[in-house]
Image: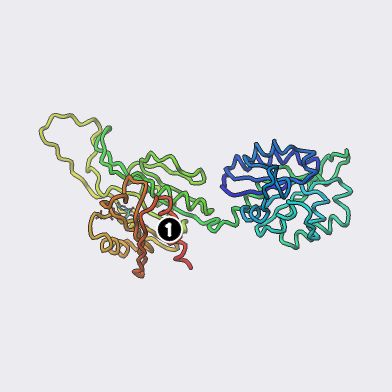
Amino acid sequence: MQLKRNILIGVCGGIAAYKAANLVRLFIKANCNVKVIVTKSAQDFVTTKTLGVLSKNEVVTDFFDANANWNNHVHLAEWADVFVIAPLTANTLAKMASGVCDNVLLATYLSCKKKTIVAPAMDLEMYQHATTVSNLSKLKEFGNLVIPAQNGELASGLIGEGRMAEPEFIFEFTINYLKKNLPLFEKKVLINAGPTYEAIDPVRFIGNRSSGKMGVCIANYFAQLGANVNLVLGPSTITTISDQVNVIRVESAAEMQQACINKYDEMDIVVCSAAVADYKPKQVSESKIKKTEEHLTIELVKTADILSEMGKRKTKQVLVGFALETNNLLEYAKQKLEKKNLDLIIANSAVEAGAGFGSDTNKVTIIDKHNNLTTFELKSKELVAKDIVHAILNLNK
Ligand code: CTP
């Protein structure tokens, strides 16, 4: 499970503090940014060097660092997408429950508007004590999430509830919380992208210059917002596809049509950015065509128009197409929007400098079915993807 988020980890002084190192590692491996705050007593159980190297950030131990620079707890709290305190000791728990603020971890907790998730760890009797039980329920009342301590062997030798939940569990719990809170959690999205290759013979094909980059950027951004993304991708050499995206590789227009239609009915949002071949050779030669004739004529027949087919069978889907034109851009784009029964069309020029095929930038005009037009500046395809996705999301508002 990968999610590039900012994770702030608070470590308190208990034997389970050594497990915080593993927790940091799990978030780093999942591509998150991690910063760690430790209390004074936590440093008796785990070193700031270990946590610093693993998190790739200097560990915060006090309001001031070694060079007398102020560690601004408000900025730390703002930076975090979530604050995970593991292990949480009885002492810090009691302070959190009553608003005591005598160290940088507590000051950050009080400043933090994002969710705080705590994983308590203490000995059996302490965990069962009425004040602990009451403090934990206060923390829940305040809106924090508590990962209960587990049953098992404790540092004291006693067996019972009090062990901190395993780092893997805390990690999964946190990632699931973050995912559920993403704006497109559980939305199903289908994107097609790239060129298609239409075979002439076993070694030759008719293709086009599409790189697939625009569609890949759109797919990546949808995934970043938590959507369940399927990318049907024609022959493309782009390697920057998020591993959150389910990629279905195809070659011809017919394969692309099949792969898209298989998914279409269950989708919420569909974006067709592929440069699908409009024609394919009527006959594909089984063997390599030899250079015997002076002239060679290849008869072409139309391929299926995937987007039109989707427009016809549209039920709940928000359907978005692209129009790539060399002339009369907006006029042709509007015609396609209507003819293919789309909700939005992204018009881009094949001849304007920096726009269209093969480039890392694009310049688009987004048109909706009420004829509202928004023209954007030339910008990177990553940023264009954000404009497109936001325009799609605004349709539902
Ligand atoms: N499209 C498609 N299937 C095709 C051709 C195009 O799904 N066989 C989709 C493209 O993915 C794009 C939209 O239709 O979203 C418009 O593609 P474009 O190439 O601009 O236009 P065409 O419909 O092919 O018409 P023309 O080539 O005449 O401009």
Instruction: Tell me which residue sits at (27%, 33%) in the image.
Output: 202
Q: Position of residue 233 (x, y in %)?
A: 39, 45
Q: Position of residue 27 (x, y in %)?
A: 63, 43
Q: Is residue 189 visible?
A: yes
Instruction: Tell me which residue sits at (39%, 50%) in the image.
Output: 381
Q: Residue furthest front?
A: 68
Looking at the image, is 266 positioned above or below residue 18? below
The residue lying toward the viewer, choosing from 62 and 362, is: 62
Instruction: Tell me which residue sits at (24%, 50%) in the image.
Output: 302
Q: Position of residue 331 (x, y in %)?
A: 26, 63
The residue lying toward the viewer, choosing from 323 and 27, is: 27
Quadrant of the snapshot with the N terminus: top right
Residue type, numbered disc 1: Asp
Instruction: Tell me which residue sits at (48%, 45%) in the image.
Output: 246
Looking at the image, is 15 positioned above or below residue 95? above
Determine if the C-beta at disc 1 is less than 8 A from ligand 1. Answer: no
Looking at the image, is 58 positioned above or below residue 310? above
Q: Residue furthest bottom?
A: 370
Answer left or right for 56 relative to 273: right
Which residue lies under the disc numbered 1? Answer: 387
Determine the quadrant in which ligand 1 lies. Answer: bottom left
Answer left or right for 357 relative to 177: left
Q: Position of residue 102 (x, y in %)?
A: 79, 54
Q: Secondary structure at mark 1?
A: helix
